Amino acid sequence: MSLFEKHNSVLTKAIDALHSRKFYAAFPEHPAPAVYGETADADGQAKFKAALGNKFSELKQSNAEGWAGQEESPYLQEPLKISYPTYSVNTLINNARSAFHTWRKVSAEERAAILMESLDRMKGRFFEIAYATMHTTGQGYMMAFQASGPHAADRALEAIAAGYEELKRFPSSALWDKPMGKFNIQLNKEWRAVPKGISVVIGCSTFPTWNSVTGIYGSLITGNAVIVKPHPGAILPIAIVVAEIQKVLSENNFDPNTCQLAVDTYDKMITKELAEHKDVKLIDYTGNSTFGSYLEALPNKIVFTEKTGVNSVILDSVADIDKTAANLAFSINLYSGQMCTAPQNFYIPEGGIPTPHGTVTFDEFAQKLVDNINGLIDNPKAGPFVLGAVQNKKTSERVLEAEKFSGKVWLKSRTFENPMFKNARVATPVILEVDSSKKDVFGAELFGPIVFLIKTKNTDESIQLAQEMAIHHGAISCGAYTTNPAVKEKIADEMALAATPVSFNLTGGIYMNQNAAFSDFHVTGGNPAGNASFTNPEYVTKRFTWVGHREPVM
Amino acid sequence: MSLFEKHNSVLTKAIDALHSRKFYAAFPEHPAPAVYGETADADGQAKFKAALGNKFSELKQSNAEGWAGQEESPYLQEPLKISYPTYSVNTLINNARSAFHTWRKVSAEERAAILMESLDRMKGRFFEIAYATMHTTGQGYMMAFQASGPHAADRALEAIAAGYEELKRFPSSALWDKPMGKFNIQLNKEWRAVPKGISVVIGCSTFPTWNSVTGIYGSLITGNAVIVKPHPGAILPIAIVVAEIQKVLSENNFDPNTCQLAVDTYDKMITKELAEHKDVKLIDYTGNSTFGSYLEALPNKIVFTEKTGVNSVILDSVADIDKTAANLAFSINLYSGQMCTAPQNFYIPEGGIPTPHGTVTFDEFAQKLVDNINGLIDNPKAGPFVLGAVQNKKTSERVLEAEKFSGKVWLKSRTFENPMFKNARVATPVILEVDSSKKDVFGAELFGPIVFLIKTKNTDESIQLAQEMAIHHGAISCGAYTTNPAVKEKIADEMALAATPVSFNLTGGIYMNQNAAFSDFHVTGGNPAGNASFTNPEYVTKRFTWVGHREPVM
């Protein structure tokens, strides 16, 4: 059985799922021993521990020009002391250029097979990746497992499926037979999906695999050579993925430099030099808006960005105020607000929120939200694991700064004890009440666990503000609560015009922060939060060019 | 029968043709009385003549703020004296914004039906459009009929089909049902294809309908409001198309301002003001590279360009040198080199061109080409109709300037008599021999009938130069002649890397200048000749945003 035959049925299912947009998961999200093996967790943890303090020597890219690594654990607040091979930009580009000219000629089937095989290998290392993710990003264990493991692998598979489908969208050849009256003109035509060249994928510190694998696999399936430039603070999770890709490439006699890891250090970042290199045609980026906008403006590049946004929650009317507050409190606490989909601005009418049991006032709702947030934090079996740790010291500082904004502080940020990591860098949410006129305060992303409760005249003003924020500052998610179908359609329509997906009336175990491969488009590409979307057709079609040749039939 | 039912079978055929890429034409290209009616030609000519000197009053957009028009016939070298309603940019934008909010909510089916109906109405005016095209662009009668009539309508239908397919790519709703072990999470999800807003389509002077209808119909099918800004020198052909679109809109109770005509004059062009307006989200453009690159760099716009390119012919070896020379001579003469697909640079090895009857030297081939060009020009039944007239006086001046370049002049430009239009502005091709080192001479598009014969060391150098020109200066077409399969694949591969389609070994009645709707992608979007392609999926997907909303199942 060829590698393609081995993976073909999953590929077919993945393409079907892209179109049906119903639930599909190729990689089970629960770290259950029954699925992943009884010793998988312990083995993964042991491997992670063994990596600490050592050279990461798994990569098949050779001739290291140096070794470096500056990762620190937000849980331990200590360096991991792992070092990775480093290379000059010229070496990376030369390696990529050479690998490109082989890889671009490999069939879509073979590319898909190799890439899907690498995901299977990645699956065998989900636990190790989970611990690596915890100790670079500060994510809790469950999120670290799911987001960096099965969810990332599903997103990668989604990109493979979308790319494969687009590569097969048009025939590789056709007979064009045009009747001209007394004779026919016949041309043999052929179409080639020509990859753009060298692709650079720039990672972020909070989701080092989830936010990078779509670009990596999207570029590779379409025949480009990829250089993966991780955030200096979160290398190990994606280094493991790149190592597995390189191993499968080598085993199948392809150049492992088809996908290189390009590690740098805070004091000598190579991102700009890489991005500006004339041979780099594709750039994928997740991170702050300033750098993202700089990349988008680079001439002669095709750039895919996920930048920052101001995510809103519109509270109009609710069926169950307690379930609503509980759901939103979880969304706020989850990974201490360090998700690009976390809510920041809560719009609440000054007249309160109608419920079947009467109207809940602004203050009553604020107090319910605070109580639910505190309740979760103070639950020792849940809080520390839901909140995790804070990746970047600057985020902790920003949270403390936020308390100084004018407006009532409903909840101050505080610390809590993580039973497993006494030295963890933690910060609970700060909740501030601000007037709807204070756009200078709430009209920007304040990354981290910072929430504004904004008193509006009515829901129309809430919608108008949420839309305005999304159009001018970007938005990746939006929550809305209403029991009124007309209001619901108005929110759906106005936020659609701001290219922002809305989660309506979420309660229970599903949160506005979450989105699912094969169903939810992540970032729409239609507002300043980013110009790309996981995984719409454009996300892969922009990575190659259709070129048609033709010749008369002899 | 609904309008959609009326057009559904053609739409289905068009979508199939997009995928099979075999020959398909919804609109017959031959102006045969049997197809279009015995009196269609005479009626069309009469209508065109009746338009001269008058106000163009067919548009349904009302409240003209002025009347203007500066078109001149290249055949008569006299003004047409047709005036069109004019509007300020603010009026145009306000009209478009208002129309947009209705049009964006119209179903894909209804949009497709209205747009296809307008193409049927356009079909009834192909002859009138043909005469309007002749007397604005200088095209010969047959090209004017085909390019502005059936071929343009086919390209418009192609854009409708591609847009319709993309709008239907994902379901409008789905039940997402995720097993969680003891329970399922069920979400009702829905996806909306949200149009970007206001679209401006900027026309060119040489192909006023063909190069504009794809953008117009591509934006309309995806729900955008369109402002059509024709070149001041070529308004009437597209004004007729816009009038037909407006009539069908009005008949179906939609705002005719969904597609407005925005006429300006040479002394007061409104293009920049339109393009830079914050509410304009989409721009389609055909024309020179300087303005095209300015548009591409505008922030927060999605821009589709067809700019200029340097099209090459690579001569390696041929089966029949006379048929080759005849075919290329026709390509050079056709519309006096004023096609974006016309060949400019001919790369010929210094060792000559091998044929089954011996090697043809560089000089022998040059003379054959000159003889074939002259033979066609001097054939009174063919020459004047193939060459047509020169749209812009600057093109005639450029042709004369070209003779001053250093290098042997194989053929000087001259005039000839058009039996129907004694006063036509004409210019036959100039053929110059230049050394392969003179990239400063041949390394730029010299729009018009200007051809360089470039002596290269060998075919490898020819390929290298053709590729370099395409990568650095853009290319829309390429001709190549070789009887060697290895050389053929090398050309196919190297030009594919330069995103340039190659026509191999064309002889007889098919030319490298031509390309067909539903089969040939026009411009690849992958080199500086333009960033868009008629009609690949990106050409329509970039005109809207997928936004998904979701809510728990109650």
Image: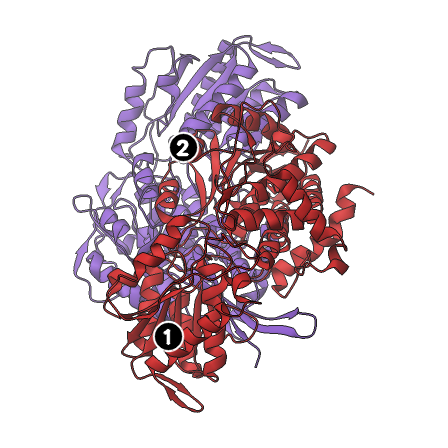
Chain colours: A purple, B red
Q: Is residue B527 above or below residue B551?
A: below
Q: SS for tag 2?
A: loop
Q: Residue B457, position in %: x, y?
A: 27, 78
Left or right: residue A365 versus residue A490 is: left
Is the residue marked by circle 1 packed among few (<14), some (14-19), or many (20+) residues within 10 Å?
few
Disc 1 target residue: A253
Chain where mark 1 sits: A
Left or right: residue A454 versus residue A137 is: right
Total marks in image: 2
Q: Is residue A69 above or below residue B354?
A: above
At label 2, the amino acid type is Asp
Q: Quadrant of residue A323?
A: top right
How far apart marks 2 and 1 lie (CA) works out to 64 Å
Q: Nearer the viewer, residue A527 or B160?
A: B160
Specify whether residue A222 is in view: no
Nearest to the eye among marks 2 and 1: give it: 2
Q: Residue A297, position in %: x, y?
A: 32, 41
Q: Residue B533, position in %: x, y?
A: 49, 54
At label 1, the amino acid type is Asn
